[in-house]
Amino acid sequence: MNQTLTGARPLLHAALKQDARNIGPWVALISALSASSVLAYAWVFPGVPERWELSATLGANPALSLIFGPARDLMTADGFNAWRAGALGAFFAALMAIFIVIRNSRADEDSGQAELLASGVMGRQTRLAVAMMMAVLASIALGVVSWLLTVACGGGWANSLALSVTFTASGLMFAGVGGIAAQIGSDARAANSIAVGTLGVAFLVRGYLDASESTAWTRWLTPLGWLEEVRPASGNNAGPLLLAVGLAVVLAAVALALHARRDFGLGMIAPRRGPARGGLVTSAWGLAFRINRASLISWLIAFAALGLVFGNLATSVGDVFASNPATSALIAAGADPVFGFLVTILQLVGIIAAVFGVQIVMRVYAEEIDFRVEPLLAGSLSRAKYLASNAIFAFVAPALGLLTAGTVIGLIAAAPGDVIRQALATIPAVWTIIALALAAVGARPEIRLIGWLGVVLTFALTLLGPLFKLWDWILGISPLWHVPTVTAAGVDWSGLAWVGAVTVLFTVVGFAGFRRRDVI
């Protein structure tokens, strides 16, 4: 074996054994996304009329193409599965690969574990190579499990295989992206931001091109567009997969080359030096702002970019609506499908804002397990004040992001007043999701993942719930379901009042629990 990879086999075995509990849920949930589509299709859309209605519904809302990609064949279960699980499954597979690589390479350097490993008989490239091999094996396992489970639930073996292989290909490509980001970022947190940001841009470009119905060649501009061109259940083309594998190999080689030239424990982007004097942060409020300042700036820029993309998309969907028989009839009747599209877009932006807020809340516990909170509380700082400084930031920052995106969208779409009012109406629902995470972190941090579950559940119920004709009481679990359309006649604000009450309840639970529980 090459000396640069000395020790790879035992490290791979030990790392897989240790990280299996983190990889397993990703494989299970993405596989369930595919299998559940096949199971639900026959139940929700049993006959041809229901399937034609589904096609008309998707044609009337380009926002769904932005998220899920083009729907090429909705008359079969496999075609529906390719639409519902294709783009999302590839996105989550890429996330899985990124987190595996950075967690098992750069994060180990930050924690000091890598230095302990390097003191043994181990080649210079071993840790990064093992981390990327773990991502490769996890991506292959995802493809196999997804294929077998989907076929067991009634999917066609060839169509299900084509779809599952796109998940694997996405993981392979973004394992390389994660490897490169691990060399560039100043620490694991920065590396994750770079890699996930790259994935977000690729997903956004792919979604914009699909929703605006751009010419076919533009799908080749992004790697996620290559996976769409595999066309599971409506072509099963293997050619784009070869491009994906080729890109994965190139990215992995670049990552290893950068790793060979990078200093241990440092990134190619040097960390910013702290202030010469520490007296600039004199309160818990200033500390909360200082800790989250970089992410606030990055997120606000991202929200402005989202507003720019979505605003331009809103100006182009008018022609799409006019060419669709269902929506052209609505326009003739005086309805405004473009604003309905904007409402859906703002719901999506609201979910993204909730991700930002939950991330801030989770940072509270991350600081705690890094033993930075107990020294603060050993002084005169009270627990309530410490948590309040972070909680207020977690509520205010996403609201600013949502308003930033809404303002940009409104200005470009020539409807600033209505769009900003709709964004304002969406903020209380976003706060409810954040408050759920705050309740978990404050009272019982061992179940803190319920905060991310709230984001995922809100996404599923808001964007897919109506499509599956779920009952209102189930749809009502999503706080975004209670947000009214501000341009409608006789707007009912009572739903937001209930959402606000739930937000207050979750917040009280978080503060009461944090006051009573042990702090690490």
Image: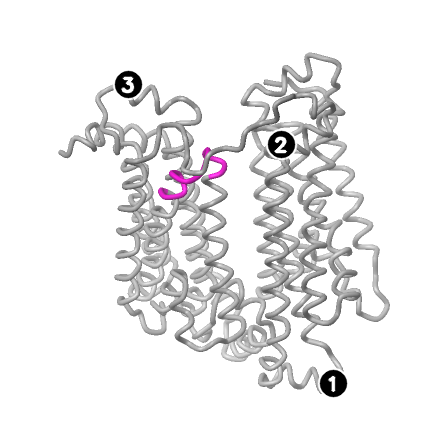
Indicate the position of residue 149 as horizontal and vertical percent values. 36, 53
Residue under numbered circle 1: 333
Q: Residue furthest front?
A: 276
Indicate the position of residue 461 as horizontal and vertical percent values. 61, 56
Indicate the position of residue 218 as horizontal and vertical percent values. 42, 72
Indicate the position of residue 392 as horizontal and vertical percent values. 74, 36
Mark pair 3, 2: CA separation:
33 Å
Q: Amino acid at mark 1?
A: Ala
**Which region is colored magenta?**
179-190
Q: Nearer the viewer, residue 226 or 201?
A: 201
For disc 3, the neighbor class at 10 Å (few under 14, some 14 to 19, many from 20) is few
Q: Secondary structure at mark 3?
A: loop
Q: Amino acid at mark 3?
A: Ser
387 horizontally vs 67: left or right? right
Magenta span: helix, strand or loop, mainly?
Answer: helix
Residue under numbered circle 3: 119
Mark pair 3, 1: CA separation:
74 Å
Please state, as top left, top right, bottom left or bottom right, where the N terminus lies in the image.
top left
Q: Which mark is residue 291?
A: 2
Q: Residue at x 41, y 40 (%)?
A: 184
Q: Indicate the quadrant where residue 166 lies.
A: bottom left
